[in-house]
Amino acid sequence: MVIRLAESLELPLRERNELLLAAGYAPAYPESPLDGPVLAPVRTAIDHILTGHLPYPALVVDRKGNLVAANEAFEVITEGAAPGLVGPGTNVYRLALHPDGMAPRILNFAEWARHILERIGHLEELHAELTEYLPELEPSSDHLGFAVPLRLRTSRGQLHLMTTVTTFATAVDVTLAEMKLEAFLPADQATAEALRLTAFPA
């Protein structure tokens, strides 16, 4: 009954386990380490997806926004950022809004900051920290008509990117269910050409 209730409410797997524990039952959904043998096929699949998305940037994060993996093109997003904000285990939301991260290169910072903060409303401590980095900004109506773009100044010129987020829809493992793959796509032809001309190792 508890599991059916949780399913009806469409609760995340972690919250379903917490509900089961509160009701006096053992958790029903495993939480496997990503580097363990159970999730080895997942790691292989992630590598294929990230490589297949080249020459466009793509990354995988956990439920807190910590970087799990990224492809080589993600360097266009992180270039110029302080070393402590970049690499496996670092937080990509902090990277996006920190003054030593991407923030100085984001041309539509007000819109992008609002987008990030709306996504992490459930991460209260991180939300509070990142809010402190933001000046008083008045967002404009800078959008593609259907999405908020990322307008980023880079060594390849000004890039206009939009993002998609993918999850493992059939996951019954907490770790897998909480992972998100974010893929950046060109929002105009100039961005597509700038990224296409960048060589990445095979």
Image: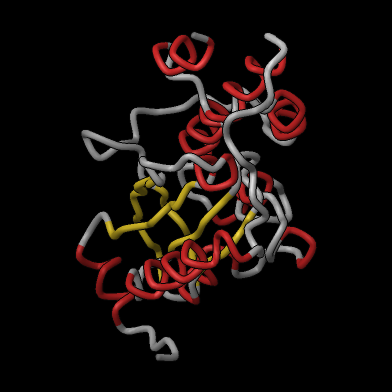
Horizontally, residue 159 falls left or right of residue 128, namely left
113 vs 74: above or below: above
Q: Nearer the viewer, residue 72 or 23?
A: 23
Image coordinates of residue 184 in percent, x first then y, are 37, 57
Considering the image in quadrants, where does the C terminus appear? bottom left
Seen at 55% across and 60% down, the residue is 39
Seen at 76% across and 67% down, the residue is 83
Horizontally, residue 95 falls left or right of residue 181, namely right
Seen at 66% across and 64% down, the residue is 35
Image coordinates of residue 137 in percent, x first then y, are 57, 27
Image coordinates of residue 192 in percent, x first then y, are 26, 69
Q: How is the image coloured?
A: secondary structure
Q: Name the quadrant containing residue 37.
A: bottom right
49 vs 90: above or below: below
How many badges with numbers are in the image?
A: 0
Horizontally, residue 71 falls left or right of residue 34, namely left
Q: Nearer the viewer, residue 135 or 122?
A: 122
Q: Nearer the viewer, residue 3 or 197?
A: 3
57 vs 165: above or below: below
Seen at 43% across and 18% down, the residue is 7
Q: Name the quadrant containing residue 57.
A: bottom left
Q: Name the quadrant containing residue 116.
A: top right
Image coordinates of residue 84 in percent, x first then y, are 79, 62
